[in-house]
Image (cartoon, rainbow, N blue to C red):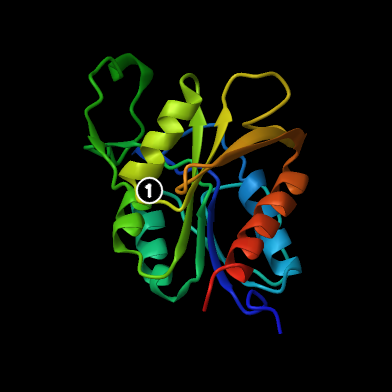
């Protein structure tokens, strides 16, 4: 039997939403497509999949256990509850870095909305899990506007990841909202490899197969 046939994989996907009042929130353009593609391919590989997703308009892959969340805090608590029993953790979610300090219970009217929005940092889920990991294989994602390699390598080290998968924001036809992307995988052994542009499903196949190969080639 393959060493990877019974792996348990924890995947985060989509955006988080940090509410200012009942109808307004801070978020980002993540659609969850990459995370959901990874979940599907991991299932096809025979892995069990826990999928923690922010608000998206996607059908969860048949066989995955979906944990819907909204805020960065709720995503953290769900990941925290699942992390210790996973073998592989792939964090594709675009988690909000900031959340409003105050939540207004009623909709803020336009004529009274001229105010300063005070923000607090959200918990760094990837860094927290990277510091806590034992035997888990942790993969982070980095969407960058500039200095892709330097920023990805810094994230790899600072958040104690095994891999960081980086993509460039702002290139037409790939990235947020698209079915396609181009990625570079930066590994803690110092190597890197670039894939795409191609479909996110094809990239998911490449990523999951590469993780599987890594486990197969690791001494028991």
Where is 89 relative to 161, above or below?
below
Depth order, front residue of 66/22: 66
Where is 105 relative to 68, above or below?
above
Q: Which residue is most to the bottom?
A: 1
Q: Quadrant of residue 101?
A: top left
**Residue at coordinates 57% horizontally, 37% vertically from top-left?**
30
Q: How many marks?
A: 1
Residue 165 is left or right of residue 4, and the answer is left
Q: Which residue is mark 1?
A: 72
Q: Secondary structure at mark 1?
A: helix
Depth order, front residue of 146/76: 146
Percent x, y for residue 198? 77, 35
Percent x, y for residue 171? 65, 19
**Residue at coordinates 25% horizontally, 25% vertically from top-left?**
117
Depth order, front residue of 47/153: 153
The crowding category of the residue bearing disc 1, from other C-alpha atoms within 10 Å (few below 14, some 14 to 19, many at least 20), is: many
Residue 161 is left or right of residue 116, and the answer is right
**Residue at coordinates 40% horizontally, 48% vertically from top-left?**
71
Q: Quadrant of residue 197?
A: top right
Q: Quadrant of residue 154?
A: top left
Residue 98 shows in this picture: yes
Which corner quadrant holds the N terminus? Answer: bottom right
Percent x, y for residue 176? 62, 31
Percent x, y for residue 170? 60, 19
Residue 49 shows in this picture: no
**Residue at coordinates 69% horizontally, 33% vertically from top-left?**
181
């Amino acid at each position: 039997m393959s060493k990877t046939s019974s792996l348990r994989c924890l995947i985060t996907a989509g955006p988080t939403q940090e509410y200012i009042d009942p109808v307004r929130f801070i978020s980002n353009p993540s659609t969850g497509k990459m995370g959901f593609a990874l979940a599907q391919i991991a299932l096809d590989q025979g892995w069990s999949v826990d999928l923690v997703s922010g608000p998206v308009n996607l059908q969860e892959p048949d066989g995955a256990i979906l944990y819907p969340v909204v805020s960065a805090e709720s995503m953290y608590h769900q990941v925290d509850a699942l992390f210790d029993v996973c073998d592989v953790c792939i964090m594709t979610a675009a988690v909000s870095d900031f959340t409003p300090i105050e939540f207004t219970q009623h909709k803020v009217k336009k004529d009274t909305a001229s105010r300063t929005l005070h923000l607090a940092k959200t918990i760094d889920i990837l860094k927290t899990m990277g510091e806590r990991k034992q035997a888990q294989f942790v993969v982070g994602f980095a969407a960058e506007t500039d200095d892709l390699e330097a920023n990805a390598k810094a994230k790899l080290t600072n958040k104690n990841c095994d891999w960081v998968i980086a993509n460039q924001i702002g290139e037409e036809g790939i990235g947020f909202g698209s079915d396609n992307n181009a990625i570079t995988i930066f590994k803690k052994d110092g190597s890197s490899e670039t894939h795409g542009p191609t479909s996110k499903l094809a990239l998911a196949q490449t990523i999951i197969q590469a993780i599987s190969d890594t486990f197969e080639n690791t001494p028991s």
